[in-house]
Amino acid sequence: MKGLDTNVLVRFLVRDDAPQARRAAAYIRAECHPDRPCLVNRIVLCELDWVLASAYGYPRAEIADVVEKLLRADALLVEDSETAWQGLRAYRTGAADLAACLMGAVNRRLGCDSTATFDRAAARLAEFELLA
């Protein structure tokens, strides 16, 4: 199995650097197949949210659509995809960033009753408690 770094996915998706975009696309076509998917771990999803929002100005809904496409892609294996779907659903309906949404879903799955935070947006999610 091969893993994909955030920068490879960003170049593949955004195509802002033509030579790197070509290399990323060629690599994904050559290495990522339904019978041999490439791994996208949760950290990559969090970084992807941050990069697309902060560096490229992607709106939240568009980032959510990108993450959903990654989750649905047969040639990709997203780490703990069931929990990633839960985080994505929270991200689509809330104000917290994807990292917080995934953290809440992962921590809940791992047995946490709640996750302490100072992040007011994350605290609106059921998995968090705000430390005031």
Image (cartoon, rainbow, N blue to C red):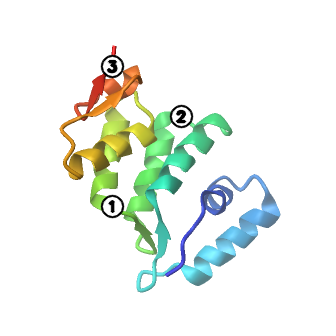
Numbered disc 3: secondary structure: loop
Residue reaching furthest top? 132
Check if mark 2's residue and mark 3's residue have beta carbons within 8 Å: no
Name the residue type under label 1: Ser
Which label sits in the foreground, 1 or 2? 1
Q: Position of residue 80 (x, y in %)?
A: 33, 62
Q: Which residue is mark 3?
A: 131
Tell me if 103 is positioned left or right of 108 in this view.
right
Q: Position of residue 95 (x, y in %)?
A: 39, 27
Check if mark 3's residue and mark 1's residue have beta carbons within 8 Å: no
Q: Which residue is mark 2?
A: 59
Tell me if 60 is positioned left or right of 112 in this view.
right
- Frontmost residue, 107 versus 71: 107
Residue visible at 40% across and 22% down? 118
Name the residue type under label 3: Leu
Check if mark 1's residue and mark 2's residue have beta carbons within 8 Å: no
Tell me if 29 is positioned left or right of 75 in this view.
right
Which label sits in the foreground, 3 or 1? 3
Numbered disc 2: secondary structure: loop
Occupied quadrant, residue 30: bottom right
Q: Which residue is mark 1?
A: 81
Q: Position of residue 72 (x, y in %)?
A: 38, 63
Q: Position of residue 75 (x, y in %)?
A: 46, 75
Q: Above or below — where is 49 with respect to 32?
A: above
Q: First in sequence: mark 1 or mark 2?
A: 2
Marks 1 and 2, Cα distance to the nearest angstrom?
A: 23 Å
Numbered disc 1: secondary structure: helix
